[in-house]
Image (cartoon, rainbow, N blue to C red):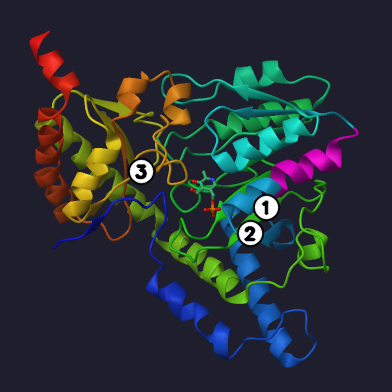
Amino acid sequence: MKKVYLDHNASTPVHPDVIEAMAPFWREVFGNASSVHRFGQQARKAIEDAREKVAGFIGGSSQEVFFTSGGTESDNLAVKGAACACRAKGRHIITSSIEHHAVLSTCKHLEKQGFKVTYLPVDKYGLVDPDDVGKAITEETILISIMHANNETGTIEPIADIGKVAKERGVLFHTDAVQAVGKIPVNVNELNVDILTLSGHKIYGPKGIGALYVRKGTRIEPQIHGGHHEKNKRAGTENVPAIVGLGKAIETAADAMKEESLRLTGLRDMLYSGISKKIESVVVHGHTARGLPNTLNVSFEFVEGESIILGLDIKGIAVSSGSACTSGSLEPSHVLKAMGVDPAISQGSIRFSLGRDNTKEDIDYVLEILPGVVSRLRAMSPLYKKSQYA
Ligand code: PLP
């Protein structure tokens, strides 16, 4: 059976060059990077080389990059770490209602610890208004955390403008750039961000590795205590193979990004135009002009997204509804809810997220299979039948 993977915002296959780069670091260069002997020195050098690559790609310096176990840990370190370090100054945090749960749940946790959190609304495209950020800042505000690109809709937030507001008002600014890095240019100076999250497995690197960029002079308190690793920001023996893999993944993304972005935009647009020609009653979510090149989120009215996923999976096509972390629950997506999407419509939403191995033939295959899946489900849907007689 043909297999078409269109769930790259959930995870990506590890690039063969990344696997090759990582391989020696399990058997040959296996030393602990803190050890003084040559086994340790080699591991240390590999870590510092990877750090240079990550820093260079986002416009920072290597002293400003700290390795973590992934996007979730980086978000926790950013938000809790900044909150703990600045709590004497104030206890107010600003974020948005469409953040990944790695930020939202961390904020909820901090609320229980006595912090006050403002969850900014978004417009119908999922965009945060930088003016709203400015208006929400008080004397007590210590951190603003707004994601760069949304994992469900692909909408790209006006990060540079929000960063400008944060800078003018002297408030720390964190962005979760897990979905943006490797897909669109990300430069910490152009974006005016102080703290930035990225993750390996969204960019053809391994799972369980990520990084946090922390601008020089920004205070964050470590959240994992132990040895002096990562300049006292994150204790624990470094995962050398994964760090090397992240460095290689970044290098590979840097080489391919411009061309890939154009190619994926073409495939995504072809997918949407095919869907809207072949299937009636579809609603697109997110900002088409300000969106990630690889992401398309559409609702098929009168059917459940989960049923479409299963119908496509039988035919070898992998897509998702909402984010990977919330699928499995039939709760409507918090992102679509914040955008004002009717819950009945958001239940039928599907996220197609394209990647490096996808071809025009893959899109043709989806367009051949999807209309039949949707029409079979609609034929069983009382809501659809009702709409036909209305
Ligand atoms: N932030 C965003 C926007 C994400 O999409 C994800 C993963 O889906 C994460 C954070 C969490 O990253 P990780 O899976 O590396 O913990």
Is 360 left or right of 100, judged from the image as shown?
left
Q: Determine which residue is flagged by label 2.
A: 55
Spatial CA distance of label 1 from label 3 is 24 Å
Q: Could you tell me which quadrant the N terminus lies in?
A: bottom left
User: For residue 381, what is the image quadrant?
Assistant: top left
Name the residue type under label 3: Pro
What's under tag 2, amino acid-wise? Ala
Q: CA distance from mark 2 to mark 3?
A: 23 Å
Sequence-wise, the earlier of marks 1 and 2 is 2
What residue is shown at x 77% (from left), y 64% (from top)? Answer: 235
The percent coordinates of residue 230 (x first, y second) are: 76, 65
Q: CA distance from mark 1 to mark 2?
A: 8 Å
Query: Residue placed at 83% from the left, 46% from the top?
Result: 219
According to the picture, the residue beneath numbered tag 1 turns out to be 213
What range of the chain is rendered magenta? Answer: 77-88
Residue depicted at 18% across the width and 53% down the height: 314
Q: Quadrant of the C terminus?
A: top left
Instruction: Establish if 292 lies above or below 26.
Output: above
Residue that badge 3 annotates = 293
| Nearest the eye: 225 or 173 | 225
SS of the residue under disc 1: strand
